[in-house]
Every structure is written in structure tokens, then in C-alpha cells.
Image (cartoon, helix red, strand yellow):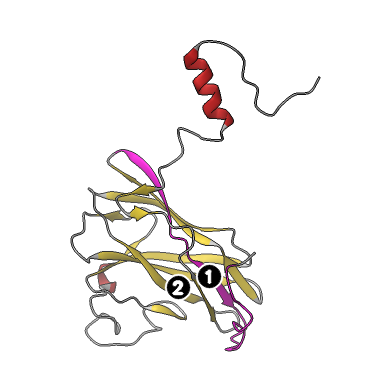
Amino acid sequence: MTRSRCYVAAGLGVALALLLAACDGSAPNDPDRDGPLGNSISDAGGQCFPTPKGDVGTFAVLGFGNSGGPARISKVSLVDPRHLQLAAAWLVPTTGSDSWGVFDGYPPDGIPGPDGNHGVPGEHWNERQRADGAVIPHLRGQDQEDLVLVLRPTGPEGSAKTEIVYYTSGGTRYMLNLGAWVVLVGNGNLHGCAKVTGPPA
């Protein structure tokens, strides 16, 4: 007898509908992908940059607002990391449109600057929160939270396909795909990114 991976028996309409939902791969308890922190993105581009051997690099090009009520971040994670560890993650309130970008080492040492904002107008590093467990209030206008990721390559090249922010707002669970791939060349070779033309396979 041949068995299909999803077997639907005749029965009541409600039961049939539930079984069909199970067959199409949907899961009613999965977090919503679009929410008050924004809509998930499948491909927002990416970044490759070198770091000295044995050091970390800071990836700070991503941010989001909050159009709803308070949102609590439960976890920030890398998707399909290869030879790459998430050493630290912060959320930094920002009232401008600029971000730190990418640089060697831990923040804020990589970007010297006056006024406590380390060279980026509107970046309030002194008000940062650890990303896991952070609470983001409702944000108005262009105000946003910049996601500052400290990444440690554990080989000659470290990579991740994207980043996911898991959070809860108004009793609903969400997972925000930021859609940005990242590659770190861990030997400090400035030319190491020349061969990187897209996201990791």
C-alpha cells in the first residue's frame, strides 16, 4: 500500500478543513511575519567587510520603528550562520536617518566622535538596551531603534543569510526577517571581499 505524506480522510467539514490546513504546511501557532516593527523582507541586500584575525566586527546597518504599543524583544538570531557567532546585540535609540555602518571591534570604539554619539547624529548609544529582553516603546516619525550586532568569525570567512527578530506586542508573537546577508573575512584582508558578490549559498 502506498502512503502519502499527508492523508485526508472523509469526515466532517471542520475536521476536513483542519486537515487540509495541515497538508499545506501552515501552522496556526507560527509567529506573524509582519507587525508593528515592520514587514519582513526576503532580500534587502548585504554587506561584506574584513576584520583582523581573532577580532570581532560590528554590523550596524539595520533598524526599525514601532507603529504599535510596547514591543518586547525575546531573541535576535542569525539565520544559517557559518563560522560566525553573535557575540553581542544591542538596540540603540536613533532620532536621525544615519547608522554606524560596519567597522572593526566593539562599539563604540570603532567610531570616535564628540557629543556622546560617536560621530553619528541622533545615535543615543548611552540609552542602548541589550537586544534580547529589550522593550521598544511606540516610536513617532523617523525615530527608530538601530540594531547593532557584534559578530565573531570562527574561520577565515564567516557568514549568515539574514537576521530574525522575535518579539511580542499586544499579546501577539511576531518574527521580523530583516533580510540582510553578511560576510566577515576574518583575516583582515581588505581585498577578501572582492570575490563576494552576493549572499552565502
Q: Which residue is mark 2?
A: 59
Residues at marks 1 and 2 touching, judged by CB atoms closer than 8 Å: yes
Front one among 125 and 102: 102
Write the residue at 63% across / 64% down.
82
Q: Is residue 86 magenta?
A: no
| Image position of 139 (left or right of 151) | left
Write the residue at 22% across / 65% down.
143
Q: What range is drawn magenta here?
A: 171-199
Up the image or down, 103 lies above or below 180; here it is below
Front one among 149 and 5: 5
Write the residue at 46% across / 39% down.
30
Up the image or down, 75 lies above or below 106; here it is above
Up the image or down, 1 lies above or below 125; here it is above
Q: Amino acid at mark 2?
A: Phe
Indicate the secondary structure of the residue bearing disc 2. strand
**Of the two numbered discs 1 and 2 in the rendering, the one whose residue sits closer to the viewer:** 1
Q: Position of residue 157 (x, y in %)?
A: 63, 75
The quarter of the image holding the N terminus is top right
* Within-10-Å neighbours for mark 2: few <14, some 14–19, many 20+: many
Q: Residue furthest left?
A: 140
Give me the C-alpha separation between circle 1 and circle 2: 8 Å
Q: Which residue is mark 1?
A: 182
